[in-house]
Image (cartoon, rainbow, N blue to C red):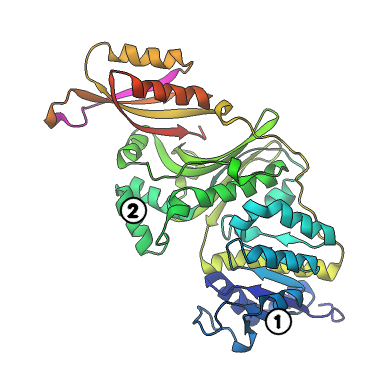
Amino acid sequence: MRQNYRNLKVAVLGSGTVGSEVVHRLLTEREELGQRIGAELDVVGVAVRDTSKPRNQAIPAELLTTEADAVVTSADIVVELMGGIEPAKSLILRALESGADVITANKALLAAHGPELFDAAAKVGAQLYYEAAVAGAIPIIRPLRDSLAGDEVHRILGIVNGTTNFILDLMDTEGQSMEAALATATELGYAEADPTADVGGYDAQQKAALLAQLAFHTAIDVDEVGREGITEITLDQVRAAREAGYVIKLLAICERIGEGVSVRVHPTLVPREHPLAAVHGANNAVFVEAQGAGSLMFYGAGAGGPETASAVLGDIVSAARRHVAGGPGVAESTHADLPMVDPGLVPTRYQIALEVRDEPGVLAHIASVFSDAGVSVETLNQHAPPHPEQGDGLATLVIHTHQAPEANLAQTVANLAASEVVSEVSGVVRVEGA
């Protein structure tokens, strides 16, 4: 260790599950971390709203404070784990303006205000680290930002929300309904009391924006990221997917299309032989396709106190080493300025489930609806009537399309819904990864 380098001051904002774990490890592993860095780390304060609140890990009382401003301006490294937009944004800006490096796991803040924060860091030569903001313990930020910086990333398919993966996995492997799987996820602590951010796709939307920004060196407006959650997925759709050799996953999809990029989140049919199909439970995985590197997959725990703390501590060590070595931080690369592709032009494939009249001529009529919209059918399977005991004269069709522009496929679905031979469009899921 370099004995002549001063101790580095670390401030932590927030002491929830992850914050408490980070502080605990900074204190108990101080000597070992110092040997890796070349300088000791001193925790100078842990800013909280209530110093008397019980915490997951014992934090010395003298470190707890409600004076976040004072803690931020006295530190070399600030770790923001409080979440939300404010006061996190103001405190991070204050830290960066004072010259401190900042580590954050705040995906919502980065997705909404990332360019402003990165610019603030660049102006003073500081660094903003955020490995823990996407996919928990999985190292994906550094590989995209550094290891693949000289390559051309074509596409990213990511399972980046553990709650939805857990729910969809239960539906697929155990035949649970959406409601039952969500209740199980809530009981086990995978889902919040209000699961909207997860099942509505908002969490994955924010992470997709960050991944796309790194992969394509372009600032991405999170509001331009297409978003569909899993709330409309039914057990019948999951079973139909299984019969066709697919599994349904909520995917963050980031890809180069011509001279632009497409970034979107939606439920997706993934072939069972694809690596992402084998991602079970609450795990995350990010599949990257690059020009030179080929296909890469990063897999592991996407959440949890110790797991996320591992990513945060990795960033702390990196920041501390930069202080010891000297030199300015490395600015984010967002200079490509690639435009977002019109969502209607994005090529994809659909699985469409229909309840139709069980009578002659129906299939010919359905085929003409597809043809009129410029969409071709890859496979069509007819199932037994959904309610044979009712004698309703209906049959179920499950149709897989060939690839076509999103607008054409959406128009096809609209035309089918308006058709006199179609009783109901019972499900539409996109197909990727084939």
- Which mark is drawn over residue 274? none
- Marks 1 and 2: which is nearer the front? 1
Range shown magenta:
376-388
Question: Which residue has dot 2 on it?
Answer: 181
Q: Residue at x 67, y 80 (%)?
A: 45
Question: Which residue has dot 1 on it?
Answer: 44
Q: Nearer the viewer, residue 59 or 83?
A: 83
Give, as a three-letter code, the residue at label 2: Ala
Q: Residue at x 61, y 73 (%)?
A: 22
Specify whether residue 403 is in view.
no
Asked if residue 284 is among those painted magenta in the image, a careful observer would answer no
The spot of residue 247 in percent (x, y) is 41, 40
The spot of residue 347 in percent (x, y) is 55, 27
Which quarter of the figure is the N terminus placed in?
bottom right
The spot of residue 153 in percent (x, y) is 68, 39
The spot of residue 308 in percent (x, y) is 57, 64
Q: Residue at x 30, y 38 (%)?
A: 236
Specify whether residue 231 is in view.
yes
Give, as a three-letter code, the residue at label 1: Val
SS class of the residue under badge 1?
A: strand
Task: Answer with mark 1 or mark 2, whichever residue precedes in sequence.
Answer: 1
